[in-house]
Amino acid sequence: MIHNFNDSLAISHEHAKAWWWTPIYSQSFHDFAGMGYMTEDGWPQRHGVDRVIWLQSGKMIAVEEKVRLENYNDVLLEIWSVWHEDKTKRTKGWATRDDLVCHYLTYVIIPSQQYFLFPFPQLRQAVRANGKEWRKKAKARCDGFYVKESPNEGYITKNLIVPTDVILSAVKGTIVGRWENR
């Protein structure tokens, strides 16, 4: 299947309207006051801010959001957003970029109604500290690690698949929860 960025973006915008974001953030932050979604392409979106959470204290929390439609018992880390085999263009993915400013990555798995709020600096550090070992395991396709290549129009996106228990062990301070149907 060939992915289309604009189609994926449209699906992402639809997921952004889902009712379950409110219970996710109100359960995760005891002083949750509200939230706003970044609908327009611009600096916030291009630097890892999909949504801003406001707390009653006045603090603002920037989050990047990822939604999985199936529960694979793993976490997909985008290592290369754009990969051209001829090396003419390669763009780091969200898991390896240094310019993202989000505080958390919210990772939602719809069928199990489960979510993970990964503190983004700790997630990035875990990828740096363990990336070489994880990529070696992924290359050998052992212990649940592997590389998933997603063809797009004119390029490939390369993702490192890491078992959920491994990433939770590597990223301290992750908030894990579930939401219930209304």
Image: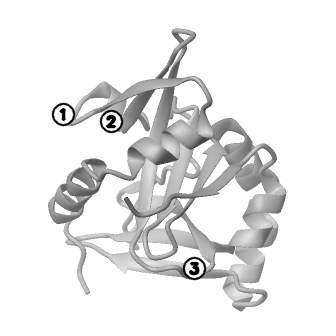
Give the image location of residue 174, x and y in percent: 72, 48
Kind of residue sitting beneath label 2: Gln
Is 50 in front, or is 131? 50
Q: Is residue 86 left or right of residue 140?
A: left
Q: What element carries label 2?
A: helix
Q: Name the residue under label 3.
A: 147
Q: Which residue lies furthest to the bottom in this view?
A: 141
Q: Residue at x 43, y 69 (%)?
A: 110
Kind of residue sitting beneath label 1: Glu
Q: Residue at x 81, y 69 (%)?
A: 133
Q: Is residue 161 left or right of residue 23?
A: right
Mark 1 and mark 3: span between their CA atoms?
31 Å
Q: Residue at x 63, y 79 (%)?
A: 73
Mark 1–mark 2 CB contact (< 8 Å):
yes
Is 27 in front, or is 61? 27
Mark 1 and mark 2: span between their CA atoms?
8 Å
Is 107 in front, or is 140? 107
Q: Is residue 45 left or right of residue 171?
A: left
Give the image location of residue 39, x and y in percent: 21, 36
Q: Residue furthest top?
A: 58
Give the image location of residue 49, x and y in percent: 41, 34
Residue 91 seen in the current view: no
Q: Is mark 3 on a helix, strand or loop?
A: strand
Kind of residue sitting beneath label 3: Val
Mark 3–mark 2 CB contact (< 8 Å):
no
Q: Is mark 1 on a helix, strand or loop?
A: loop
Mark 3 and mark 2: span between their CA atoms?
26 Å
Q: Name the residue under label 2.
A: 45
Q: Name the residue under label 1.
A: 40
Which quadrant holds residue 83?
Answer: bottom left
